[in-house]
Amino acid sequence: MINKDGVRANPAYMYRFTCHEQERALCSMEIRQLLQQEPGWQQASAVVESMLDIAVERSPYLKYRLQIWLRAASFEQFLQQAADLQLDQSYKVVATEVVAGGKPGKLAYAERRRIEQALGIAIGGKVDLAAPELLLGVMQWEGEWRLGRYEQNEADWQRHDRKPRHYSTALGTRVARAIVNIAVPRPDASITLLDPCCGIGTVLMEAVSQGIAARGYDMNPLAVVGARENMAAFNYNCEISIADMRTLQGSYEAAVLDLPYNHCSVLPAEERWQMLSALKALCKRAVIVSVEPIGEELRQLGAHIIDVGQVAKTHFKRDIWLVSFTE
């Protein structure tokens, strides 16, 4: 059913994800948490249909989303339905791709123009190719034509790469943003994300930039200074303090713990156990990043392992663990 603004009641969405092979496991974890579905990867891309409304700018791997207004089995039926749309906003039609057998395929230039022109003529309203108020996307999904609001991910988060303070072992911006989404897939005002080893604040920046309340701690005073400077550079605000996480008190819905390491040594097992034990006392749900295997330690702690993935960075790999500490 289409309402007076041309919007389908209870709309479905098409989400198009793209990532490098080294980050596919992480992207898959993010999709499972954001959209509660298993992605069907075809080379570097995955297209997921969902009733869940996830803002297009949240995922660093999301290329675009299409809010579906119209569906038709044939292009002729599609044009007939499109003729019923009467839009108050100026618009432009963008032909995206054809998906068959789960595999996205590019449309030839001439075919894209033919589809866009035919729909532009059929839809009631003002076409504006230069500065449209509304972008309409069209795709063919397993033989069915679909049209609706088209939103591209402008990737504003990439500006965080230009933060004033950097550290060689810090998480990359893209990875940090995905980890935040895995830790807090459904943000609301009751959730504060804890980062007890925040370093220069990469995770905190990706949380606060999405409107997620966050709190950071680090036992290294220089790291805390760097984190505060990075946050201030983008006018982000959250509490960042000097503290050893093993001394922290409180209760949090979610946390991200990037276990410390350096290129010359690994974290002693006893210290890692103390940190994981402290984390269990602090939060209900956590994403833990480790360069050492910690599965057995998590099981000994009684953690429920929800998901696990891996992401590579130059010469080493990080394991990403999503766990729950509630029964």
Image (cartoon, rainbow, N blue to C red):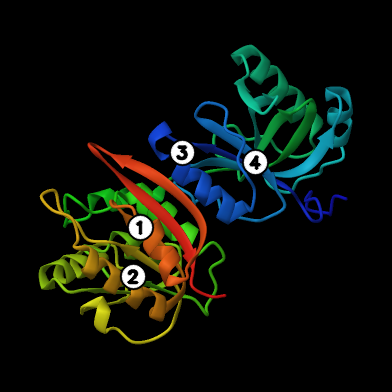
Quadrant of the rendering where the C terminus is positioned: bottom right
In front: mark 4 or mark 2? 2
Q: Do the residues labelled 1 and 2 touch (CB within 8 Å)?
A: yes
Labels 1 and 3: the sequence-earlier one: 3
Report the amino acid beneath label 4.
Val
Q: Is mark 3 on a helix, strand or loop?
A: helix
Tag shown at residue 294: 1
The crowding category of the residue bearing disc 1, from other C-alpha atoms within 10 Å (few below 14, some 14 to 19, many at least 20), is some
Residue beneath the point at 22% across and 55% down = 163
Between 270 and 318, the one lying in front of the other is 270
Residue for point 71% across, 38% down: 126
Instruction: Decide: is 238 above or below 157.
Output: below
The residue carrying mark 4 is: 48
Numbered circle sitting on residue 24: 3
- Label 2 amino acid? Leu
Q: Which of marks 1 and 2 is nearer the N terminus?
A: 2
Looking at marks 3 and 4 on the same chain, the residue that comes earlier in the sequence is marked by 3
Indicate the position of residue 105 as horizontal and vertical percent values: 61, 21
Residue 237 at x, y percent in the picture: 32, 73
Towards the viewer: 30 or 99: 30
Judge whether 252 appears above or below 62 on screen.
below
Q: What element carries label 1?
A: loop
Q: Earlier in the sequence, mark 4 or mark 1?
A: 4
Residue at the image position 61 percent from the left and 14 percent from the top? 108
